[in-house]
């Protein structure tokens, strides 16, 4: 079928916002620059987050400019082109919004999004992010450790996996009026992956609230996995005994495995994963195993065949 197509860092070493928004402007890929010139100033729709502290779980690599992060991305609920999310996501209403935490847990709860944001300490995590299509970014995500929410919910012994479900509303999300995916979008993690310190629920970018096109009001970020694992606009977090069926796994199981760890030795059936192009760079670079987070996460997969369990 046709598919449309941490390194520790001191807070004093983090590039100031005014600098990273100006750097490497002349290096920008022509198609991205052209698209961003046609789009509105997406920063106008966001507000500053309060109480965000810098995290030690960050890379010192140069950050991708805000304009690129918010105008070049995948979010099929708003269209399959890279510029579609920024152009179409204005229809999404993020208030009121609730997130249901349910399943094999002792304390099920329906969270109001603002109460959820206030309930857990917010950090800025500067993470490398790698798309399965071969491009990558370095993004300062603002959010909280998913493990904190999991501890509050107290999973039972039957909880082996965590399933994340996105809003299903074709009126607000025009891409859901197509059959490109089996809606609603769903993703999942094994429990130990969900509990890992690198896994976060993000509610912002660059110290500002998360723009609609990047998954507002709350999305999953798992930096050692390909970007499609990061479910956006989450409305349900469910703890389950069996491995969840994911959106891309339902559509193309031979191309998008459950684990989806960044692995340069396992090619996508239609392209190589050995190299990547960082947005803003001209030349490609070698893809790092686990996206460069191997020292932190490789032990989660000890003994597993990572070619079979891709």
Image (cartoon, rainbow, N blue to C red):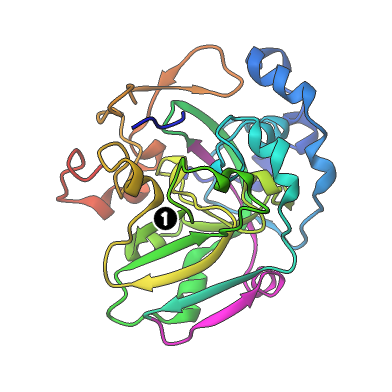
Q: Is residue 113 magenta?
A: yes
Q: Residues within 10 Å of mark 1 (few under 14, many from 20)?
A: many
Q: Tell me where residue 243 appears, x and y as whole percent.
A: 28, 62
Question: Which is more toward the observer, 22 or 73?
Answer: 73
Q: Residue furthest bottom?
A: 106
- Residue on which the image places disc 1: 187
Q: Residue at x 71, y 70 (%)?
A: 114
**Left or right: 1 with respect to 106?**
left
Q: Is residue 251 magenta?
A: no
Where is residue 250 drawn, in percent x and y?
A: 33, 49
Taking the image as drawn, is residue 233 in sight? yes
Asked where in the image residue 71 lies, by quadrant, the reply is top right
Residue in view at x 54 percent, y 45 percent: 58
Q: Magenta residues, as a range?
A: 105-129
Residue found at x 80% / y 53%: 48
For image coordinates 33% across by 47% down, the residue present is 249
Q: Quadrant of residue 233?
A: bottom right
Identify whether 120 is placed above or below 53.
Answer: below
Locate residue 74 relative to residue 94 in the image: left or right: left
Looking at the image, is 265 positioned above or below residue 55? above
Give whichever of 124, 10 is nearer the camera. Answer: 124
> Which quadrant of the figure contains the N terminus?
top left
């Amino acid at each position: 079928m046709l598919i449309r197509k941490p390194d520790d860092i001191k807070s004093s070493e983090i590039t100031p916002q005014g600098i990273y928004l100006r750097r490497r402007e002349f290096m920008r890929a022509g198609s991205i620059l052209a698209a961003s010139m046609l789009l509105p100033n997406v920063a106008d729709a966001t507000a500053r987050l309060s109480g965000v502290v810098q995290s030690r779980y960050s890379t010192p690599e140069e950050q991708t400019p805000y304009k690129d992060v918010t105008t070049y991305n995948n979010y099929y609920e708003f269209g399959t082109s890279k510029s579609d999310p920024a152009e179409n996501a204005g229809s999404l209403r993020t208030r009121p919004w609730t997130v249901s935490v349910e399943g094999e847990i002792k304390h099920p709860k329906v969270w109001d999004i603002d109460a959820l944001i206030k309930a857990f300490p917010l950090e800025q995590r500067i993470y490398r992010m790698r798309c399965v299509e071969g491009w990558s970014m370095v993004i300062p995500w603002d959010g909280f450790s998913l493990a904190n929410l999991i501890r509050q919910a107290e999973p039972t012994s039957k909880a082996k996996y965590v399933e994340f479900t996105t809003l299903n509303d074709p009126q607000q999300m025009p891409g859901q009026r197509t059959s490109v995916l089996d809606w609603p979008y769903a993703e999942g993690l094994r429990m130990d992956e969900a509990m890992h310190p690198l896994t976060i629920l993000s509610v912002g970018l660059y110290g500002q609230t998360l723009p609609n096109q990047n998954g507002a009001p709350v999305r999953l970020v798992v930096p050692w996995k390909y970007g499609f694992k990061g479910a956006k606009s989450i409305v349900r977090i469910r703890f389950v005994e069996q491995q969840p069926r994911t959106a891309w796994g339902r559509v193309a199981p031979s191309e998008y495995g459950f684990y989806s760890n960044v692995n340069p030795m396992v090619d996508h059936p239609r392209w190589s994963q050995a190299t990547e192009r960082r947005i803003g760079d001209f030349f490609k670079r070698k893809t790092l195993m686990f996206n460069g987070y191997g020292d932190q996460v490789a032990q989660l997969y000890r003994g597993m065949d990572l070619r079979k369990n891709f």
